[in-house]
Amino acid sequence: MITLPILLYPIKDELVRKAVVNTRLETVEGIMLLDKDTPLTPEYVYLGSPEDVADALSRLPQKGPLTFISAGDSEVLDPYFEQDGANLIVTSLPLFPLQNKIQRILCNYLKWVKDLDETMRSERGIQGLAEKGFEMIGYPVVILNMGFKMLGGCVPEGFNDPLLQEIVKNGFLSYDSVCSLLDEEAKLTNPFAPKIEYVSRLTGNRTIIRRIYYNGNLVARVIVTLEGEEKNEYCLELTSELSDYVQNYFLSTKASQYMASTEIGVLIADLIERRLADPEELEHRLKLVPALTITKYYHTMVVSFEERSKSIPWNYVISQIEQAIPNSCITVYKNDILILAKKQRHNAKPSFDRERMMEILEYYDAYMAIGNYSKFLTSLRPIYMQTKATIRLGKVFRSDPQNRIFHYEEYSIYHTIDLLADPAHNGYHNGNLIYLCHPAFVTIERYDKKYGTNLRDTLYVYLTNDCNTVKTAKQLYVHRNTLYYKLNKIEELIGQKLDDPLLKERLLFSMHVVEYQEKYINEDLLALKRYSTDRTM
């Protein structure tokens, strides 16, 4: 939206006097030269000689404040400085130079706004908005996230400002610089206002800051730094306009949904997406987010929601989870709730109210996976990916169909097979995982299919009971002699004794491969496909 400070900026040195009743020119679309028959509507800014302006003011309609700019001054305008129905601007410029300057700034502004809108919707995102902001404002523009890391910026080389130089060099502000910046803000009359402006004691430059909020959470700062102490209404207004587009960008992108735009969410997203790898930067960032400081160890937990027609009340759900999983950091990442549950000892199990969590998960039709623990936040990415995969696999391989909480270690063997089955990781198999199985197991599997026996199931129970025949017979509800007969048959088929530890490991792994192929891929392991293209046909 064009404002009077923006419109008058190119003629600021030619202003003689003015009477302003409204700086917001919300409906203005262009300019019009005055004559005695010119209709007066809020869609235009009117330019003319003092006499033409006075004539227009004498017939001013009651349609809201209009704006008149006079080319020259005259006493005929004096009476109209007392009325409050219009903006009256008097300049020393002749009419045609006045028209050219006003027309140019209006056209430039309208084009700039259009470019901002297109950039906001494009892949250029925040960086593109910062560059467009610099084009019109003419001073450095940087956009920082909650961790004071630069999301986008445009700073001309040689601009004398230590804080900007630090941001450009490192991509973020150090802890000491952040403390200095926040200390300056705290000394303002209203330090928590969304719009603040001050002359920095550190740099001597005037600083304009617009805070960007989403759902009450501060997600970013748009900072424009002027050279020197002088106030500039033109830059102030353009910064507000730029900030509106930055705000809309955050509202329209999944990257900033809900609580993911809080301090913890930004830091966690940077860690998972490998935007934060420098140990020094991590140290500075953690000082700004003391809640995320890991004293000993942390377990990664992920809560994932099924497709639903109604939106999820994220803040309320998080508050419920906080009661069930105390001493944890919780945020939203890519439409999942991510939890870092702290613990003091490496061998301690993650502590949480399982019954309460099951109630929450059932109510919202969600599932939770508990990943491995670590003491290093730099390990978050692989642990998160393991934990996220556990939900997908747990829903398929859970023994209890009512269970909604999965531990990674219980499904880690399936995750290993899942990675081996992924063509993105392995390009040498043809879509059938039989190549992972021990040949002896394939022999047993084929025998079962040919004769309708259950030697595979017998072998699985026998191996999972650590080859204890008493436990195995009891679990299978068979006589021990029957069990011995089946075990002897297995050894006869494979031509090996079952007392070889390596053989037992390979056979048990082979059984998990078959289970994965049958339950997850829904294919028969023995239906060997000869060509890699078969899987996609």
Image (cartoon, rainbow, N blue to C red):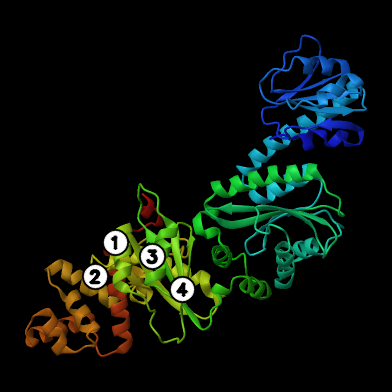
Mark 3 surroundings: few (<14), some (14-19) or many (≥20) residues within 10 A: some
Left or right: 57 with respect to 302? right
User: Which one is earlier in the sequence, the residue at label 1 or at label 3?
Assistant: 3
Q: Name the residue under label 1.
A: 362
Circle 3 or circle 2, nearest the eye: 3
Give coordinates of residue 243: x percent, y percent: 67, 47
Residue that numbered label 3 is attached to: 320
- Does dot 2 land on a helix, a strand or a loop? loop
In the picture, the disc for residue 399 is 2
Pointer 2 and pointer 4: residues touching (CB < 8 Å)?
A: no
x and y percentages locating residue 417 in the rendered image: 37, 70
- Side of 375 where 204 appears, left or right: right
Residue drawn at x 47%, y 69% as measured from the top left: 384
Measured Cα–Cα span from mark 1 to mark 4: 21 Å
Q: Residues within 10 Å of mark 2 (few under 14, many from 20)?
A: few
Three-letter amino acid code at disc 3?
A: Gln
User: Which amino acid type is shown beneath numbered disc 4?
Assistant: Ser
